[in-house]
Image (cartoon, grey):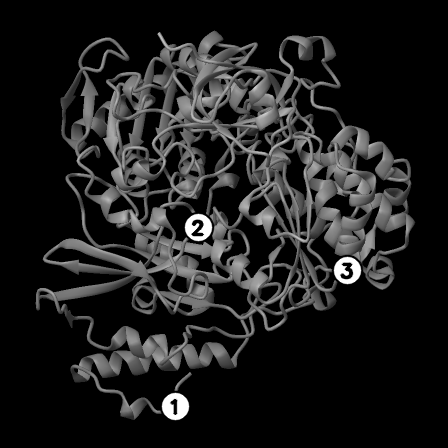
């Protein structure tokens, strides 16, 4: 905190007094610990690389732009072009955003932005954006729309909800959402307030939630990489993730590069030779879908060669002997035949990670795309655990949890409704009454829409998700949405999914929304204010719509103003939302080895190598290997017709899942969907670089453009996901042309605990398209 407050120049006395009050509030916060919270923060930083950000926030906002000499207001906010949350400065002139740039004071990105963030203005003022509510005037999917008012749109939705409630019960109402933006938790909150157990999104069983649940059951929290202390990680293990291209969940991509520049040793496990793999000390080119076998083999090396941290294991873990016995037979020679990674390279990687201190783990969604999802994630998570790298400077650390939780009203949902949640009877960790983050099983949701089994889903409200592009088995998803009595979609653009709706609502972009962002996700060491600065057309924030609907439905909860919710969550920091908007961000300094005072927040108080939570629910408490149901090993006969292993889903710098293909600056850099093929494979199929090719599974075929690269195994094909073509006419907008989910499947077998289906490592064939 600065001491020379009297030397600061203020624009008026009121501003000076307001700053002094805030200064005293923050000073008290630094001097006294938070009460009633585990892992209590020791203080609050609002700092930067120059004068205090409190001082900056209360200096005059208006600056003279050299080019126009007009006055601009500068707002501190958080970019949400992905769900990363880079700190930004937003310049507004005459009610219009004119510039967005990285905030040099942000502890996450330090002034840097990616190409998606730099396209924020293009997104905000895109002529293709939805700007007004609309209702369909013809058959579903015919593309005929009429503009209506917000009142009429919400009245239609409320009427449909009440009618369905009365006839089929609240469980017949489904709520859908997409990847985790500002409104994600509010979707869950609204579903619980509405009384339905059936909300879902493409990733609850397939993306990030399995890692969250694994963190909670194993460590009592979700560990993150410590890029923020004075101790640089000695070794970084990057598994199924490409953090220099994508920075979701607040694990901002720039910090990884900073870490490497300071000398961190790097191990990359990925089927593709990514840019990060090119920088690695070791690159393990694993067969898609065989990550569980590789992790077990690395655990075998560490336990058998006694490379584990004996002191940490003895004092702070349970189940080590059982784990050692479980991986005893998982020798690298066995894993070599399964993973395609040489046995000696597996040993080298395990030794490097175990012997280099501190070591940390960056893991990604690729681990969560097979029916052995949960045990794969569990196996990988135990590598930092048994090597003693948990909650140490430069290691895999547990968060500071700066904010109070958003009340999700889970306790308001009756017990009988929790039992009715689709999937609750089969997938205890995902959907059961004892689930840590309960959601419905999405394939079961779509089945209920189509067949009415075990009971019908009649109404589906989707917020921020292009379901036809992002769920597996697009044809089945299409049939499911068509079978609904009523579908409402709230989005930024008229997507192929929105074209199937009865009512379409125009969503606000991140520059039009007030929200709190706690980053990294779950850890919440840094809290940023996302600010509403402008509004395009009649666009509204999803959260505002939830509140409006709750009030119109006379729900007992979920009706309070957004700012009241924000102020409640910020109480541990002693701030209001208005305070945080002025500051831009607040940081709680990391405390390490918190478990020495409080233990781990697990049932045993220790790191649970054998998970008592899984055992209680009737699942295997230890990780194990399971071959994907569709692979060259499990389906050799099918592999004769479809000889290649299909991988899908790698990120590009220019798009985020199915988003931004209508933004000219980004689409110009990446105009076509790309399939990666090894040159030897391509030569045998008469495929040249740049050719359009067919990629086919037993479920369907798509076309993408060939890119030849020796950075992929000759037995593997990689296709990009999320592709549709906004420039093509509706209602389909090219969703059936290059969409990877036409190739994927959502059928059983599922992960027994999470309900995860096989989304990658499927079998495919590829051929050159003949030009007509």
Secondary structure at numbered mark 1 = loop
Which marked residue is nearer to the observer: mark 1 or mark 2? Answer: 2
- Residue 59 horizontal/vertical position (percent): 23, 77
User: How far apart are labels 3 and 2 at the CA level?
Assistant: 28 Å
- Residue 516 horizontal/vertical position (percent): 38, 55
Which residue matches tag 1? Answer: 3
Seen in the image, is 39 located left or right of residue 140?
right
Which residue matches tag 3? Answer: 388
Which residue matches tag 2? Answer: 84
Is residue 325 visible in the rendered structure shown here? yes
The disc, 3 or 2, on the residue closer to the chain's N-terminal end is 2
Secondary structure at numbered mark 2 = loop
Contact check, label 3 and label 2, Cβ < 8 Å: no
User: How far apart are labels 3 and 1 at the CA level?
Assistant: 40 Å
Q: Quadrant of the rendered structure where residue 646 is?
A: top right
The disc, 3 or 1, on the residue closer to the chain's N-terminal end is 1
Contact check, label 3 and label 1, Cβ < 8 Å: no
Of residue 524 and residue 102, the one placed in the foreground of this image is 102
Quadrant, the C terminus: top left
């Amino acid at each position: 905190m600065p001491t020379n407050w009297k030397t600061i120049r203020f624009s008026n006395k009121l501003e000076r007094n307001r700053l002094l009050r805030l200064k005293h509030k923050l000073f008290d916060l630094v001097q006294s610990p938070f009460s009633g919270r585990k892992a209590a923060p020791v203080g609050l930083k609002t700092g930067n690389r120059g004068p205090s950000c409190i001082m900056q926030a209360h200096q005059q906002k208006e600056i003279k732009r050299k080019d126009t000499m007009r006055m601009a207001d500068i707002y501190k906010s958080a970019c949400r072009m992905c769900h990363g949350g880079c700190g930004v400065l937003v310049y507004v002139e005459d009610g219009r955003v004119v510039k967005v740039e990285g905030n040099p004071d942000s502890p996450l990105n330090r002034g840097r932005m990616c190409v998606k963030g730099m396209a924020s203005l293009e997104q905000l003022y895109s002529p293709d954006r939805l700007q007004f509510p609309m209702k369909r005037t013809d058959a579903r999917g015919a593309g005929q729309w009429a503009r209506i008012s917000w009142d009429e749109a919400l009245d239609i939705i409320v009427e449909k909800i009440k009618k369905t409630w009365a006839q089929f019960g609240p469980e017949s109402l489904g709520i859908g959402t997409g990847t985790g933006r500002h409104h994600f938790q509010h979707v869950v909150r609204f579903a619980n307030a509405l009384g339905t157990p059936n909300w879902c999104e493409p990733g609850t069983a397939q993306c990030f939630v399995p890692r969250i649940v694994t963190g909670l059951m194993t460590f009592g929290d979700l560990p993150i990489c410590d890029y923020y202390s004075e101790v640089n990680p000695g070794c970084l293990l990057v598994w199924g993730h490409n953090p220099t291209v994508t920075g979701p969940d607040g694990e901002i991509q720039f910090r990884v590069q900073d870490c490497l520049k300071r000398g961190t040793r790097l191990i990359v496990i990925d089927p593709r030779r990514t840019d990060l793999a090119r920088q690695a000390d070791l690159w393990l080119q694993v067969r898609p879908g065989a990550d569980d076998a590789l992790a077990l083999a690395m655990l075998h090396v560490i336990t058998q060669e006694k490379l584990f941290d004996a002191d940490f294991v003895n004092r702070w873990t349970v189940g080590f002997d059982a784990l050692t016995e479980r991986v005893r037979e998982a020798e690298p020679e066995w894993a070599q035949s399964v993973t395609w990674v040489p046995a000696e390279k597996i040993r080298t990687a395990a030794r490097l990670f175990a012997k280099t201190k501190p070591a940390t783990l960056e893991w990604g969604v690729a681990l969560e795309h097979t029916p052995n999802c949960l045990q794969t994630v569990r196996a990988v998570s135990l590598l930092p655990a048994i090597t003693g790298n948990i909650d140490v400077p430069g290691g895999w650390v547990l968060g500071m949890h700066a904010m109070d939780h958003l009340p999700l009203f889970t306790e308001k949902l009756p017990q009988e409704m929790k039992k009715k949640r689709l999937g609750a009877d089969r997938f205890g960790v995902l959907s059961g009454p004892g689930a840590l983050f309960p959601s419905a099983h999405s394939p079961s949701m779509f089945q209920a829409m189509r067949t009415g089994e075990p009971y019908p889903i009649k109404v589906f409200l989707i917020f921020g998700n292009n379901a036809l592009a992002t769920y597996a088995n697009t044809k089945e998803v299409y049939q499911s949405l068509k079978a609904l009595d009523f579908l409402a979609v709230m989005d930024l653009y008229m997507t192929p999914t929105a074209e199937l709706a009865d009512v379409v609502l125009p969503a606000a972009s991140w520059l039009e929304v007030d929200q709190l962002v706690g980053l990294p996700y779950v850890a919440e060491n840094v809290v940023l204010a996302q600010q509403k600065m402008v509004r395009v057309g009649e666009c509204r924030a999803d959260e505002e719509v939830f509140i409006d609907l709750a009030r119109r439905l006379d729900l007992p909860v979920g009706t309070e103003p957004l700012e009241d919710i924000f102020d409640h969550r910020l109480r541990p920091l002693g701030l209001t939302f208005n305070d945080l908007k002025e500051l831009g961000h607040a940081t709680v300094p990391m405390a390490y080895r918190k478990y020495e005072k409080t233990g781990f927040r697990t049932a045993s108080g220790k790191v649970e190598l054998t998970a008592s939570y899984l055992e209680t629910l009737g699942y295997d408490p230890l990780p194990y290997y399971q071959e994907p149901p569709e692979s060259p090993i499990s389906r050799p006969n099918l592999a004769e017709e479809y000889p290649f292993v299909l991988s899908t889903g790698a990120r590009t710098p220019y798009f985020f899942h199915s988003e931004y293909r209508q933004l000219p600056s980004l689409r110009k850099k990446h105009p076509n969907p790309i399939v990666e093929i090894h040159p030897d494979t391509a030569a045998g199929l008469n495929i040249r670089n740049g050719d359009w090719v067919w990629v086919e599974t037993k479920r369907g075929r798509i076309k993408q453009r060939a890119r030849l690269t020796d950075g992929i195994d000759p037995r593997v094909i990689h296709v990009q996901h999320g592709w549709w073509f906004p420039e093509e006419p509706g209602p389909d907008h090219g969703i059936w042309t290059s969409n990877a989910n036409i190739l994927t499947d959502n059928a059983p077998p599922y992960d027994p605990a999470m309900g995860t289906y096989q989304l990658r490592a499927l079998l495919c064939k590829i051929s050159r398209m003949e030009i007509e």
